[in-house]
Each structure stands twice: as C-alpha cells, then as structure tokens.
Amino acid sequence: QGKIFAGVVLRDYDYSIALGFFGSWLGGMSLTPLEYVLGSKVHFTFGDRCEAALLDTAEYGHVVSGLEVFDQIIVTPGTDTPPDISGNLDGQGIDRRKCEDYATAAKEVEDGIEPTEIYTLCFWRASPFLRP
C-alpha cells in the first residue's frame, strides 16, 4: 500500500558539477509555475552533486507527482482491450477538462488500483510548452 508517483529521472546528467546559487534558486522558482500548469504539487530535486554523486547511494535528479498530474485517466478491465492511444479518447475515463473535482477523482482511481486492470494515463496539458 502506498502512493503512486509518476515522473522523470535525469540519469544521463553530469552530476560532477556543483550546483550554483542561481541554478538552485531558479530551480525552486520554476516549481510554482510548473505546479500551476500541471494542477498538482510536484517534488523536484537536482540530485546529489560532486563527491556525493559518486556514491552507490547517490540520488539522481528527478521531478515527480501523483496521478493527479495526468490530464486523463482511463481504467480498462484486464479482460478488455485498452483504448487506442492514437485515436480519439474523448468521453473515456476521467478527464480534467470535464471533471469538476479532478484531484478527488484521480485519488479514487489511485486508491482502487488493481494489478489486473489496465491504466491509460494521458498527459497533454503541458504539450503547448514542449514543442520541438
């Protein structure tokens, strides 16, 4: 039993360089806008640096949040076929745009997770900011 987190781990990053004051400050300042865009609290760390980064117990830089960070959650019974993610997903599962209390609905999904079900987690809210 526990909370499910989704996120990104920065494995291929040069941790030998010390993090300066400005970088640390800027990283902390960027959390509030990111949380606003995602609609969820976010945990962020730059990870261990310099000598600490060489230890077997070194922490990688990462950013994580709960299921409420996703914009749409579709639960499919394991005996059924999950939705085609390249198709239209409108009207399936819970959708942030259409759910009055999305955070509560996402928590209910999290509390009821079963290993026999298929979870389709859609993340499109930040897509305007991720253009190549």
Image (tube, rainbow, N blue to C red):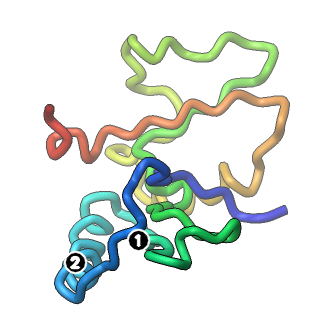
Q: Position of residue 7 (x, y in %)?
A: 50, 53
Binning the other alpha carbons within 10 Å of mark 1 as few (below 14), some (14 to 19) or many (20 upward) gives some
Q: Amino acid at mark 1?
A: Phe
Taking the spot 78% from the left edge, 64% from the top edge, the residue there is 2
Q: Position of residue 30 (x, y in %)?
A: 23, 72
Q: Position of residue 127 (x, y in %)?
A: 23, 39
Binning the other alpha carbons within 10 Å of mark 2 as few (below 14), some (14 to 19) or many (20 upward) gives few
Quarter occupied by the N terminus: bottom right
Rendered image quadrant of residue 24: bottom left
Q: Position of residue 36 (x, y in %)?
A: 26, 67
Taking the spot 67% from the left edge, 10% from the top edge, the residue there is 81
Query: Relative to residue 66, is residue 83 depicted above or below?
Result: above
Mark number displayed over residue 46: 1
Front residue of 92 and 2 = 2
Q: Amino acid at mark 2?
A: Gly
Helix, strand or loop status at disc 2: helix
Taking the spot 69% from the left edge, 66% from the top edge, the residue there is 56
Front residue of 76 and 60 = 60
The residue carrying mark 2 is 23
Query: Relative to residue 33, is residue 94 depicted above or below?
Result: above
Q: Residue furthest bottom?
A: 21
Quarter occupied by the C terminus: top left
Mark number displayed over residue 80: none
Q: Do the residues bearing badges 1 and 2 touch, measured as CB atoms within 8 Å?
A: yes
Earlier residue among tags 1 and 2: 2
